[in-house]
Image: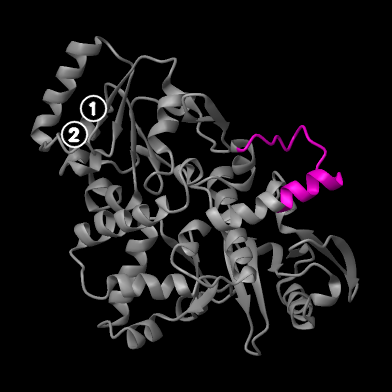
Amino acid sequence: MMHLISDNKIIEMEFPFNTDSITTGAASIILGPRRCGKSTFSFEILKNKKFGYINFDDERLSLSSNELNDVIEAMYSIEGNIDIILFDEIQEVSGWEKFISRLINEKKVIITGSNSKISGRELSIYMTGRHINYELLPFSFNEFLIYYGFDVENSNIYTTEKKAYLINMFSKYMKVGGFPLALKIDSNYLIDLYNDIINHDIIEKYGIKLKLREFARYIIANYSSEISYNKLSNILKISGKSTVNNWVLYFNQAYIFFIIERFSFKLKEPIMAPKKVYVIDNGLININMPDKNTGKLMENTVAIDLLKCKNYGHNNFKINYWKDYKGHEVDFVIHSGTRVIKLIQVTFSSSITNIKKRELDSLIKASDELNCDDLYIITWDYEFIKNVNNKNIKFVPLWKWLIIKNKIII
């Protein structure tokens, strides 16, 4: 797929949206964070098709669901007969689900928006089985490189010059992240974006004011770490674990951070155990945290990459972390059902001597317990295959890991 960034720059996307999937009977819903490029992407894939477009995020449009049919009739009078209708942020109109449920019987429909506004009771009532959801996320490192004119597939990345360039660009990616306008303008743009998401997608929708920003700062300060809902409730003096659980859900739906659970073959343990929290884009960490931990930023980068692999590849796998009662921990467990596919550690190391023995021991212990021999330690800039306890551990630099395609195969 292609993604238009400006009038003269088009970025090839990894986003697996097939225009053949746009059909009557089911709305195609493109979800994602504010300003990650959903509308621009939609325009690009429809540029050679007969389509109509309505932007409900325009403050000049103040409509009720009863007036939506009038809008469609006005569009027909201007555009004539059209094949596809693109509704941008239609969730701003209360009761839109019922209208769309009728319209998709006659027209092909694409809807863009965020999970925080589109998910809900009405969607499940009126459109159950009548919508296909896609999630568009900020640029991956591959897309980031393409934006800056570097073609990974047609370049020799092993020359000294190219490798130095890639490491330098990766350092920049770790700082700025992948929101298109943060690259086009500068990272200060993310401050306004972050505030807009909190104000419009959480505070206005749910009517929460007290402690919400403090809650967000605390969560972001603990990125790539375990969090306990009970502990959060006590520290921030928020009334009840259920409130914390709801707030985490709101931020997840607004695409600020996401949670992964602890892996266990026992059904109750992931529910009861602490969760690990990751921010959807490193740029949002850097505008909130004056002092950054490179190791944690690397782990957050891997978490985002795995999430994109899952969403974009439509792979039937899950992402968890592993920890035993002695505190041995593995950052990521990739599994399909009870079959563990990969175990991944992340460390800020450039040589084997800098890698802590505990990280190796934890990986081996998890390998034995979970019956998985596909073992990785993702480093800053160390590459090797080392045999430990008759198990081959692959050490891969993070910048290289990020540009590997099809790295998760079920």
User: Looking at the image, can residue 114 be seen?
Assistant: yes
Q: Residue at x 15, y 44 (%)?
A: 94
Residue 150 placement: quadrant:
top right
Rounded to the nearest angstrom, the CA distance separating label 2 from label 1 is 6 Å
Q: Check disc 2 and give the amino acid type.
A: Phe
Residue at 32%, 55% in the rendered image: 197
Q: Residue at x 78, y 35 (%)?
A: 155
Q: Main secondary structure of the magenta part?
A: loop
Q: Which quarter of the figure is the N terminus placed in? A: top right
At 32% from the left and 62% from the top, the residue drawn is 250
Residue 155 part of the magenta segment: yes
- In terms of secondary structure, where does tag 2 sit? helix
User: Do tag 2 and tag 1 residues touch (Cβ < 8 Å)?
Assistant: yes
- CA neighbours of label 1 inside 10 A, class few (<14), some (14 to 19), many (20+): some
Label 1 amino acid?
A: Leu
Whether residue 338 appears in this view of the structure is no
Number of labels in the image equals 2
Q: What x and y, as percent, mark residue 113?
A: 33, 43
| Image height of 205 relative to 98, above or below | below
Magenta segment boundaries in residue numbering: 148-167
Mark 1: secondary structure = helix
230 drawn magenta: no
x and y percentages locating residue 237 in the rendered image: 28, 86
Circle 2 sits on which residue? 99
Between 291 and 309, the one lying in front of the other is 291
Vertical relation: 303 (above or below) 276: above
Residue 93 vertical placement versus 241 (above, below): above
Q: Is residue 5 above or below residue 316?
A: above
Closer to the camera, 290 or 63?
Answer: 290
Q: Residues within 10 Å of mark 2 (few under 14, many from 20)?
A: some
Q: Which residue is mark 1?
A: 103
